[in-house]
Amino acid sequence: MVGEDAVLPCHLKPPKDASRMTVEWGRHDLKPRFVFVSLDGHEHSADKNEAYKGRSSMSHESLRNGDVSLKLSDVRHSDNGRYRCFLPKEKKEHFVELVVGSVSSPAISLAELDASNSGVMLDCSSAGWYPEPEIFWLDGEGSIMSAGPSETNKGPDGLYTVSSRVTVEKRHNNNITCRVQQKDINQTRETHFYVQDGSFVPQPDCSVSVSFSVIFGLMVLLGAAAFCWKWQQSRICEFIYFLSYKEV
């Protein structure tokens, strides 16, 4: 992990004293490529990459036992790479892949209401991961929830940001967990979120809807009946008026 010390293993087999040997540690993608060089048991700083000065070392006691491992202090993401341990006298080389990881805890927020299924949509995101992690949701029983596709972005610093959204429906247990993990470095971070009952969209009441429809229908019928009654009354009045006019 970032900030920790790492030991890149390399040993002579069968073990023998390497304190008088030349040991080269390097990376082919660097210029200069040397990370550490030991000559006759002493550090040789010529052609050593500046990024590793003061952070790379070898144990003199271990060299006597054929242990030519390299220690890197305060590792950083720029240390990621394939290292070569080479002993010219022995004509032997060994390669070690170093992966420096970093993690951060995810954050959950209430994104929006989902009226289509009377639920709420939660958003989870976590930044500053390396290598690229995976993200998923768990319900209150620890089962993986069905969520939309996650989004992954790689920043200019090479670190990853992951995010995901999930819709939570009203249920007995609304304890939701967002988990982010990276199996290669055996790291997991998770955050818990409890969805309050008041956050859910109320389900429509069918009985209320039916009652409203019935009342509305009756009002329409009564209105039509009143209109017809008034229309009939006006026709009768016109007929009486017509008869009276004829008699006059």
Image (tube, rainbow, N blue to C red):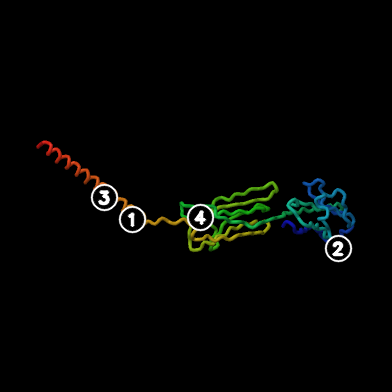
The N terminus, quarter of image = bottom right
First reached walking from the N terminus: tag 1 or tag 2 = 2
Label 1: which secondary element: helix
x 63%, y 48%: residue:
153
Residue beneath label 2, please?
61
Can you see residue 78?
yes
Task: Return the x and y of residue 155 as percentages of the image width and height.
Answer: 67, 47
Q: Amino acid at mark 3?
A: Leu
Reading the image, the residue beneath label 1 is 211
Mark 2 vs mark 4, CA separation in Å: 62 Å
Q: Are marks 1 and 4 in contact (CB under 8 Å)?
A: no
Q: CA distance from mark 3 to mark 4?
A: 43 Å
Q: Amino acid at mark 2?
A: Glu
Q: Position of residue 162 (x, y in %)?
A: 62, 51
Question: In whole angstroms, how far apart are the C-alphas of marks 3 and 1?
Answer: 17 Å
Check the image and report above or below for 104 versus 31.
Answer: below
Q: Earlier in the sequence, mark 3 or mark 2?
A: 2
Identify the image quadrant of residue 240.
top left
Q: Sequence-wise, which precedes: disc 2 or disc 4?
A: 2
Q: Mark 3 highlights which residue?
A: 222
